[in-house]
Amino acid sequence: MPSVVGLLEQHELAARRLADGLREEADRIQAELAAAEEEWQEWVIARRRVDTVLAPDGAADAGPQAAAGPRDRDTQPTFRDAAKPKTQVPVWREGMAPSVLSVDYQRIHQAVADRARLGQGPLTCQEMAAAFGMDVVPARVEALRSKAKRLVAHNWLAEPTPGRFILAPGVSGPGDGS
């Protein structure tokens, strides 16, 4: 007959495996959501461009809102309202400087680059939140994780183990000649 402690350890192990599996699934879904939102924004831009091209001559000079009817003007937000400037993360290419990123993404990149420069290894989102002076609460940590995952998806950072971020191969930190 197994001991009570042994049974508790088995249940604990099963619960830990379940939690790890759910965490991995949540990370995968978060990455898919970010990709879907980015694709959606690209389609919005494409539609706006087509609207501008197909607009009558006078409306094309006045911009995309002039082509819309009075009812559309009230119900359709413009792309400028949907996204703040510089909030999209460009895919990293050789020679691209972190200054092309928005301030939030630059802060994350800088923190990871500083960590690499000091030889301290990967950085977690909880450590980032503490370093940025934020409350280390799940909402703040998950917001940072989402941004860090977007930087991973666009080749600025790498995630060698889940939840731990380093600079992607080839990417250098600010002041390192990039």
Image (spheres, rainbow, N blue to C red):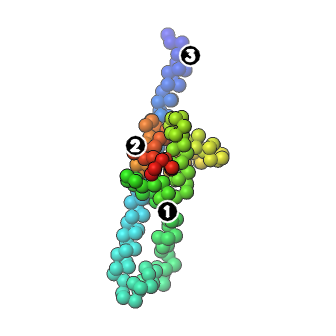
Q: Residue at x 40, y 74 (%)?
A: 48
Evaluate if marks 2 and 3 touch, with contact meaning CB atoms under 8 Å apart. no
Q: Between label 1 and label 2, give the one nearer the viewer.
A: 2
SS under mark 1: loop
The residue nearer to you, when weighing 91 against 96, is 96
Q: Can I make out residue 19 in this image?
A: yes
Disc 3 target residue:
5
The percent coordinates of residue 60 (x first, y second) are 39, 84
Residue 151: x and y in percent read: 45, 50
Dot 1: few (<14), some (14–19), or many (≥20) neighbours within 10 Å? few
Task: Say which amino acid is labelled 1.
Answer: Lys
- The spot of residue 104 in percent (x, y) is 55, 54
Question: Which residue type carries mark 2?
Answer: Pro
Image check: 131 left or right of 40?
right
Residue neighbourhood size for the residue with mark 2, other residues' Cα within 10 Å, grouped as few (<14), some (14–19), many (≥20): few
The residue indicated by pointer 2 is: 169
**For mark 1, what is the residue?**
86
Closer to viewer: mark 3 or mark 1: 1
The residues bearing labels 2 and 3 have C-alpha atoms spaced at a distance of 46 Å
